[in-house]
Amino acid sequence: MRATTTNLENHRIKLLVEIDDEEMNQAIDAAAVTLAKQVSVKGFRKGKVPKNVLIANIGGPAVLRSEAIRESMPDFYAHAVAESLIDPIGQPDINIIAGEEEGMLSFEAEVEVRPQVEITGHRDLRVTIPSPFVSDTDVESQIDRFRETDAILKDVDRPIVTGDLVTMDVHVQQIATDVEPLDMSDFMYTVGSGTITEGVDELIMGLKAGEELKLNGNVGNGVVATYELKLKQVQERVLPELSDEWVEENTEWATVEEMRDAIVAQMRRMKIVEAQMSQRDAMLVALGELVSEDVVPEVLVESETSERLHDLGHRLSEQQLNLETFLQVTNQTPENLLETLRQDARRAVRIDLAMRALVKAENLEPTSEEIDQELEQTAESMGVTPELLRTNLRDTGRVVTFNAEVAKMKGSRWLTENVTFVDPEGVTIDVELLRSDQSDGLDA
């Protein structure tokens, strides 16, 4: 086989492919085996028809050659892609230009390839992630949660504040529906929890027992309801005094100091894990935003969307669910779901293009040794030999794709080392902290 490339406009490439006689004869023999299993010839069992008899019964050598070309064209194209090291992202337009009936087979294949974009600003990225630092406020809030389990309720005659427990009668009437009103007596509501409807906490604060409140709120699916609240009793939670005696009697620790130290250690681990979990996604999203929407090929977006939809269907099938049930449970329409998947797909494509651009900008292309090492590790995880995996990649035209994945892994490591991570307050986070599961104490 011989394959040459010509660059066209709009990120398209033309492949000129010539198939030598040896490859063509192999394709003809393979087609003969396939047809022999399909054609019935008197005196012969299926699959046992000699080649010359088969040719005579199907209309001559030209028919067999035509079938061989049709059957082997996907492999011819895949091998040409692998040999020329192009990165196609769409289906090719193939046109046979010679050898369809005899002589050397040659064909042209025009296909859209992945655009190579350039990015700037990747060395100056500041990425916000959840704070891994434990503050005094964090610790005191957690201690108060323990104390709240032993709190007592005390009636108060003052304006309502966040955290108060309000006993009320509730009347809910949906607007423009035939649904019967909902009435609840002596409903106990913690101010600030937001469990009644949006906006109730802002309106209820400052009121007192004996007053009434009326507001409209959304009950879901675009339905609006009128809420009427009669405030009957307001109570505040009185927390027990924090002392060694109380800690020993009500917790697993013996002293306030032990309790505080344990909470700090636990929260530190949790916060670092939370920061670590968001670190990679946050930096990749920030990198992807360096790529303009204008250069994102729609064919890649649609392909990624289809793949995500297929993966979703597979996961639902494993859980013995169907798409219709999933849409009902998640309160989505098919259009909403598809748009969400498409947005996620577009973001993923931008990240992919940006990472490839970063690899090129920072000269991070993998060496042959690095590719071989990753290929061996991948083959081991798949339970096959490196030689078999290498052959499969070549035969399916995925050599460029595999090499790109190795390059992007290097790019991701570079990005982790060079991005500036900050917490929501803008405080810089030492990347070394995110590699460990400990820090030195109260950090902020």
Image (cartoon, grey):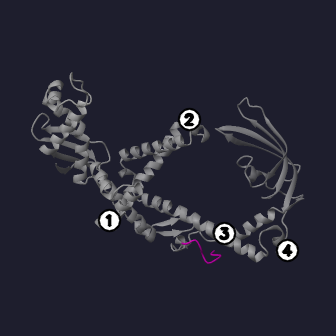
- Start and end of the magenta stretch? 436-444
- Residue designated by label 2: 324
Inter-mark Cα distance, 2 to 3: 41 Å
- Asked where in the image residue 298 lies, by quadrant, the reply is top left
Dot 4, crowdedness within 10 Å: few (<14), some or many (≥20)? Answer: few
For the residues bearing labels 4 and 1, Cβ distance under 8 angstroms: no
State the residue position of label 1: 366
- Residue type for callout 3: Gln
Residue type (three-letter) at the residue carrying disc 4:
Glu
Q: Quadrant of residue 117?
A: bottom left
* N-term-proximal mark, 2 vs 4: 4
Disc 2 + disc 4, Cβ < 8 Å? no
**Which residue is found at the position 22% from the left and 53% from the top?**
84
Q: Nearer the viewer, residue 293 or 366?
A: 366
Task: Pinpoint residue 278: horizontal percent, then vertical percent.
Answer: 54, 61
Instruction: List x then y, in percent, for residue 73.
Output: 23, 40
At numbered mark 2, what does the secondary structure look like: helix, strand or loop? helix
Which dot marks residue 266? 3
What predominant SS class does the magenta segment belong to?
A: loop
Q: Between 233 and 280, which is closer to the camera in this rendering?
A: 280
In the picture, the disc for residue 208 is none
Magenta-drawn stretch contains 216: no
Provide the secondary structure element on which disc 4 rests: helix
Mark 3 and mark 4: span between their CA atoms?
22 Å
> Which amino acid does the dot numbered 1 rest on?
Pro
The residues tagged by marks 2 and 1 sit, at their Cα atoms, a distance apart of 45 Å
